[in-house]
Amino acid sequence: MSTVKIPPVAPSARDDAMQIYRAFKGIGCDSAAIINILAHRNAIQRSHIQQEYETMYTEELRKRLSSELNGHFKKAILLWMQEPGARDANIVKNALKGTVKDHKAVTEIICSRTSSQIGQLKRAYFTHIGTNLEDDIESEASGDHKKLLLAFISTSRYEGPEYDEIVVENDAKALHKAAKKFGLEEKTFIQIFSERSRAHLAAVSICYQKMYKKPLEKAIRDEAHKSFEYALKTILRCAESTAKFYAKALRKAMKGLGTADTALIRIVVTRAEIDMHHIKAEYRKKYGKTLNDAVHSETSGHYRTFLLSLLGANH
């Protein structure tokens, strides 16, 4: 469920484009006006605004925003202005091939997406980046982590709620047997985690706990390592509850000395129109404070105002 507050009757894309153009005029940019418009329009409306702006002023809105804004606020706005598939594609490309590699971000985006979202990501990746996602993962990732990512993006998974209890029990047994071997027999884990639906994997997790008196995640933690471990845990946690997974990721981004702003921006922007309402509820339940309060205390200025707007806060 989205937390983005859209006006019941939004101005036309043309009117919005004109207001944004006015915000660029004069000394400095009227960032508050930019936020008041763009943080309160859905993906289709933002796309129309960009089209109108380019038609009227013969320049790309994102390029103008890039030249007018700065810092974390600029990063957040520019990410927000991309359509969801292209946004995911660019995040993955930058994390895979940027100056600083971020395999955790690659894993988070890929392993938290549904099968249909992966399809959108792959199409957008080819369209906007100009290469196949599989080829870039092949060249930039390594080991079992690479094998799992490639299997996950090349397999079409059922997205409904039904599952076969016999297959669930067999999978729990197979995973236990694989985890007991010297290290972890990665082929079994890769096959089951890449091929099974979320409902099925969640049922496997419950079955595993009942049969072996030990969480499946602990078996992964004990035997898998680094990026491969994180990928398996991301797939499993998102099968159990994507909202809980992201609540925990947000907490981690804002915990300790300094804020991991790249992660904070990525999560708030990519989930605001999908399930942020549920993420906020899980965050409050688990950590005893609202996500809005946490973001407010860890950010400042227009950057704070923009993120809080996406989270549905009133200003």
Image: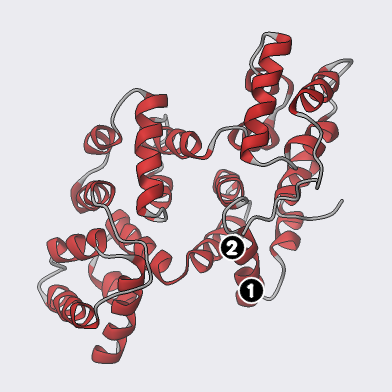
Q: In which quarter of the image is the N terminus?
A: bottom right
Dividing the picture into quadrants, the one containing residue 172 is bottom left
Image point 55% across, 47% down: which residue? Answer: 270
Check if mark 1's residue and mark 2's residue have beta carbons within 8 Å: yes
Other-residue count near label 1 (Cα within 10 Å), few / some / many at <14 / 14–19 / ≥20: few
Q: In this figure, which colouring scheme has been used for the structure? A: secondary structure
Of 302 and 12, nearer the camera is 12
Task: Report helix, strand or loop for mark 2.
Answer: helix
- Residue 214's spot in the image, x, y percent? 30, 86
Other-residue count near label 2 (Cα within 10 Å), few / some / many at <14 / 14–19 / ≥20: some
Question: Mark 1 or 2 closer to N-term?
Answer: 2
Does the image show residue 73? yes
In the depicted structure, whether residue 16 falls above or below residue 164 = above
Judged from this view, the residue extending furthest toward the top is 58
Q: Which amino acid does label 1 sit on?
A: Tyr
- Residue 229's spot in the image, x, y percent? 30, 61
Question: Residue 192 bears which disc, if any?
Answer: none
Label 1 to label 2, Cα distance in Å? 8 Å
- Residue 139's spot in the image, x, y percent? 23, 33
Judged from this view, the residue extending furthest toward the left is 181
Task: Report helix, strand or loop for mark 1.
Answer: helix
81 sits to left or right of 19: left
Residue on which disc 1 sits = 287
